[in-house]
Image (cartoon, rainbow, N blue to C red):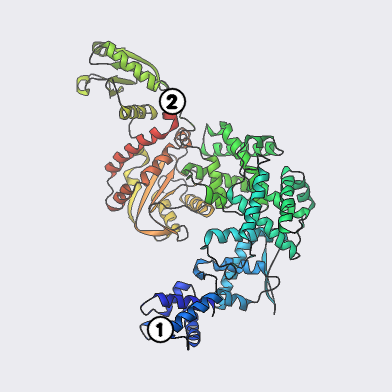
């Protein structure tokens, strides 16, 4: 019995009502014609097994069992003959299945074999072959065809081994883990216990060198690389490297670590490894390690990486009008420690899922934006191409955690008036200075009669326990804050808001950033590109170049597609397209597919920090992006935006989040 026939029998045995051939075709990822042909073959097999498959026009197919005992004996014997679990072809990417099959084939593979492998017609198989060519391109591998022989993957042995390793990683993270080994996987079979022993060898030796702090995923990738090398050597596929690569890696500490590892693995696997095998493993050590130790700063090449990191940080500061990030020595060191592995992975196209699978912290909006800007800079200046996973990793390295770059405050002069007496006023002033010393230059304690007679033009703020109606004689230029002797955390948060914003308005200019006319409801669009057109057209009055904004957003989506959360997408280009800070909210009539159909989005938020340098600080410490994330990821607010957007209510909720965000910032504690 063919695997697809086993699957059909399993499905019909579990379904208790007639089903159409199209239903079965959809569940197995094949054509309805393939289903009908295999059902006919299956009926011939079941002729004397106590069951058959019945059909009725307009109803479908169902399994009818006449002799339960004989049928169960047949099922039992079939299971023994086919001990492997059957994996649904839909759950295994057919394109990668083609790649795995061709990589491990010793010679040419006829296209008829791929037809049988995929249960697909010739046209569909050719489409998968074309997609396979696209996946193989970054590895510098090609699929060639030869008349009367078939298809074959050709390229450098180094690239083939790394592609095999990538396919193992893809299989382990993108398919169901089952007992099946060869039918769908089509890769060399490795004993998991042997692989674990190799990982232990690497782990024990890396402890001798503090800079080789490899992740769990890295250990798995490197152990597979060793096993692949052993198999490929036995099959007669030898590695060759250019002299420049040999010189580059034989002079590194990584080479000697790799040699120690392979010496022990040679005894375990009963094989021999060449110098080129050692270099391949050394390349993996450099590319996959996660540099965390300051001892890395003493290795060869770090100063070169630090120069590149410094240039990169200066570029990010210049591009965004940031004034603190370019002085952040820790950030320069973090990027420098990361660059060596990043450049090595790019140069030798090492692909791994370790960053996306192990990074648990969600990087911030501003960090992702800076990471994409860094990607463009590194690509244009050094010609390296990094994947979306690498950008996420770079975002985690950059990640300017909110509050890391504190705002620069101009200290103010304040006065304090108590409705009890001056001694109570002095107590209030003392507490205020203790809690807000960084904001207050001087605070004078006055009596009510002094307040009436004194020139108040030298004060910016008045703290008082009097009611506002009792102080109707005060000038409009003086901000009054009513406060008691013992103020709580909510009062502290409100006072902090007064100091943080320049005009001491508690809404922090959000009415200027998010205006009623920039909230668009009932928008009817059906695609991502249509959304970009709609954003550019709706904000055309404040945009310098609407078409430039669209192209910028499309480029950002190509580099790293946005991930909707609760049907909300927060978008921003790599460049500023408005003069002042702008936030546009677009509520669609219905959700649309986003990120290649994996997610849906109904609320699109475009934010732009503008070109006014004074506003850059609010984005450098991530105040505005962090506020947007918290506000637009509030499910209650999302529902209200979709059903009945009330602008005044939105502003009230924004004020609450404003206070929460300030409390979270380390520079405001």
| Residue 327 location (% of width, % of height) | 56, 31
| Residue 55 location (% of width, % of height) | 40, 85
Task: Quote the CA–CA distance across marks 1 and 2.
Answer: 83 Å
- Left or right: residue 233 versus residue 124 is right
As displayed, is residue 226 above or below residue 428?
below
| Residue 251 location (% of width, % of height) | 77, 44
- Circle 1/circle 2 CB separation < 8 Å: no
Q: Is residue 349 visible?
A: no
Q: Quadrant of the N terminus?
A: bottom right
Q: Which residue is mark 2?
A: 409
As displayed, is residue 573 above or below residue 613?
below
- Label 1 crowding class (10 Å Cα cut-off): few <14, some 14-19, many 20+? some
* Dot in front, 1 or 2: 1
Q: Which residue is mark 1?
A: 65
Looking at this view, is 192 or 152 the one in front? 192
Kindly state the secondary structure of the residue where label 1 is placed: strand
- Label 2 crowding class (10 Å Cα cut-off): few <14, some 14-19, many 20+? few
Ranked by sequence position, the earlier of labels 1 and 2 is 1
Kindly state the secondary structure of the residue where label 2 is placed: loop
């Amino acid at each position: 019995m063919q695997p697809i026939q086993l699957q059909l029998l399993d499905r019909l045995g579990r379904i208790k009502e007639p089903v159409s051939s199209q239903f079965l075709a959809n569940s197995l990822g094949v054509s309805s014609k393939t289903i009908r042909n295999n059902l006919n073959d299956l009926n011939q097999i079941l002729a004397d097994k106590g069951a058959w498959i019945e059909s009725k026009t307009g109803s479908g197919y169902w399994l009818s069992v006449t002799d339960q005992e004989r049928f169960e004996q047949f099922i039992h014997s079939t299971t023994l003959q086919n001990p492997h679990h059957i994996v649904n072809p839909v759950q295994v990417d057919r394109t990668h299945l083609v790649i795995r099959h061709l990589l491990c084939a010793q010679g040419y593979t006829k296209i008829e074999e791929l037809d049988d492998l995929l249960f697909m017609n010739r046209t569909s198989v050719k489409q998968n072959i074309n997609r396979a060519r696209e996946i193989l391109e970054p590895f510098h591998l090609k699929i060639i065809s030869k008349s009367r022989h078939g298809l074959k993957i050709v390229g450098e042995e180094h690239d083939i081994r790394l592609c095999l390793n990538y396919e193992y990683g893809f299989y382990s993270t993108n398919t169901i883990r089952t007992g099946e080994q060869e039918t769908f996987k089509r890769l060399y079979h490795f004993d998991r216990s042997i692989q674990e022993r190799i990982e232990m060898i690497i782990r024990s030796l890396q402890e001798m060198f503090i800079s080789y702090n490899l992740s769990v995923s890295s250990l798995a990738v490197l152990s597979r690389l060793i096993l692949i090398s052993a198999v490929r050597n036995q099959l007669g596929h030898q590695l060759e490297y250019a002299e420049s690569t040999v010189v580059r890696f034989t002079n590194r500490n990584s080479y000697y670590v790799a040699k120690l590892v392979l010496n022990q693995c040679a005894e375990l696997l009963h094989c021999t490894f060449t110098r080129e095998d050692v270099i391949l493993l050394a390349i993996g050590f450099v590319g996959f390690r996660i540099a965390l130790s300051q001892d890395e700063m003493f290795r060869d090449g770090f100063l070169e990486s630090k120069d590149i990191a410094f240039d990169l940080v200066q570029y990010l500061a210049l591009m965004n009008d940031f004034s603190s990030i370019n002085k952040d020595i820790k950030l320069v060191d973090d990027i420098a420690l990361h660059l060596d592995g990043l450049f090595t992975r790019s140069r030798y196209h090492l692909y791994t899922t370790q960053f996306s699978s192990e990074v648990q912290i969600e990087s911030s909006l501003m960090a992702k934006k800076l990471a994409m800007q860094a990607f463009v800079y590194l690509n244009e200046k050094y010609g390296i191409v990094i994947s979306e996973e690498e950008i996420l990793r770079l975002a985690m390295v950059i990640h300017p955690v909110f509050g890391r770059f504190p705002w620069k405050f101009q200290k103010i002069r304040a006065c304090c008036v108590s409705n009890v007496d001056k001694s109570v006023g002095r107590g209030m002033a003392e507490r205020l200075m203790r809690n807000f010393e960084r904001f207050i230059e001087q605070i004078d304690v006055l009596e009510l009669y002094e307040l009436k007679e004194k020139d108040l033009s030298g004060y910016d703020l008045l703290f008082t326990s009097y009611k506002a109606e009792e102080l109707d004689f005060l000038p409009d230029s003086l901000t009054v804050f009513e406060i008691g002797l013992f103020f709580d955390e909510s009062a502290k948060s409100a006072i902090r808001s007064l100091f943080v914003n320049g005009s001491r308005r508690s809404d922090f200019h959000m009415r200027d950033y998010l205006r009623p006319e920039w909230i668009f409801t009932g928008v009817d669009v059906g695609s991502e590109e249509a959304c970009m057109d709609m954003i550019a057209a709706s904000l055309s009055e404040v945009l310098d170049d609407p078409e430039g904004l669209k192209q910028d957003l499309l480029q950002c989506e190509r580099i790293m597609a946005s991930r909707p959360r609760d049907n909300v997408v927060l978008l921003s280009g790599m460049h500023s397209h408005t003069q002042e800070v702008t936030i546009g909210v677009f509520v669609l009539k219905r959700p649309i597919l986003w990120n290649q159909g994996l997610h849906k989005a109904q609320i699109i938020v475009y934010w732009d920090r503008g070109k006014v340098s004074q506003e850059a600080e609010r984005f450098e410490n991530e105040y505005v992006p962090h506020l947007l994330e918290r506000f637009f990821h509030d499910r209650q607010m999302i529902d209200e935006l979709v059903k009945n957007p009330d602008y005044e209510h939105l502003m009230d909720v924004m004020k609450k989040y404003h206070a929460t965000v300030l409390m979270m910032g380390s520079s405001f504690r």
